[in-house]
Image: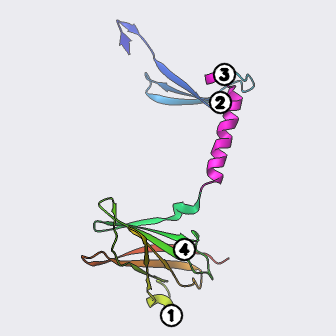
């Protein structure tokens, strides 16, 4: 960058923990280096020593990871204008156990009450007696429905199909799960 005929290199820097991250505007790239002296314990923002801030940050990250739930195993499918989010309890399905499923149905970012969902679980590669066992889902609140499925009798690829009718037509969505033998 030239300012009044003088070549000027501008480097924006900030410290993240004990690493120095730099953006060099002249070269147009990031540069990442570790700080040379970790024992200097220099005070950063607010007079808190840098090493102390680093340890506090590491502890906070550890707590966030340790306290996270298994809710991230929810699956969402879009069927036309509808969005279905299926969750199971337990979140990790297990061979030899059944599970309780909840489905949340939305259309245009609004929970849909008055729907009639039902579900079934089956293994696409096998023909099981429970393949055609449909479980009617009961409403818990607007847009949220619950049903208990059958026992997962073996490990492998399973699918949970949710059929629903919200007054205009019958639709379905399929959710895939893989169960492992314990």
Q: Is residue 67 magenta?
A: yes
Q: CA distance from mark 4 to mark 3?
A: 51 Å
Work out which quarter of the rendered image holds the N terminus and state it: top left
Q: Residues within 10 Å of mark 2 (few under 14, many from 20)?
A: some
Q: Secondary structure at mark 4?
A: strand
Whichever of labels 4 and 3 marks the residue nearer the N terminus, that label is 3
Q: Nearer the viewer, mark 4 or mark 3?
A: 3
Residue 41 horizontal/vertical position (percent): 72, 24
Q: Which mark is residue 19?
A: none
Q: Quadrant of residue 90?
A: bottom right
Q: Quadrant of residue 34?
A: top right
Residue on which the image places disc 2: 18
Q: Is residue 135 magenta?
A: no
Q: Residues within 10 Å of mark 4 (few under 14, many from 20)?
A: few
Whichever of labels 3 and 2 marks the residue nearer the N terminus, that label is 2
Q: Residue at x 52, y 64 (%)?
A: 73
Do residues under tags 3 and 2 come within 8 Å of each other at their CB atoms?
A: no
Q: Secondary structure at mark 2?
A: loop
What segment carries the magenta color?
45-68
Whichever of labels 4 and 2 marks the residue nearer the N terminus, that label is 2
Q: Which mark is residue 47?
A: 3
Q: Residues within 10 Å of mark 1 (few under 14, many from 20)?
A: few
Q: CA distance from mark 4 to mark 1?
A: 19 Å
Residue on which the image places disc 1: 129
Q: Nearer the viewer, mark 4 or mark 1?
A: 1
Work out which quarter of the rendered image holds the C terminus and state it: bottom right
């Amino acid at each position: 960058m030239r300012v009044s005929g003088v070549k000027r290199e501008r480097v924006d820097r900030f410290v993240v923990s004990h690493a120095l991250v730099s953006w060099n505007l002249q070269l147009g790239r990031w540069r990442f280096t570790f700080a040379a002296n970790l024992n200097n314990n220099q005070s950063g923002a607010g007079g808190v020593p840098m090493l102390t801030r680093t340890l506090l940050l590491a502890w906070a990250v550890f707590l966030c990871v340790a306290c996270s739930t298994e809710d991230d195993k929810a699956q969402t499918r879009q069927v036309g204008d509808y969005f279905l989010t299926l969750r199971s309890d337990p979140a990790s399905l297990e061979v030899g156990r059944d599970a309780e499923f909840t489905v949340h149905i939305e259309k245009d970012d609004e929970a849909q009450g008055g729907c009639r969902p039902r579900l079934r679980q089956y293994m696409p590669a096998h023909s099981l007696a429970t393949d055609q066992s449909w479980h009617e889902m009961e409403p818990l609140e607007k847009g949220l429905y619950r049903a208990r499925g059958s026992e997962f009798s073996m490990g492998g690829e399973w699918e949970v199909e949710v059929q629903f009718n919200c007054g205009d037509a019958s639709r379905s969505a399929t959710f895939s799960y893989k169960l492992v033998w314990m």
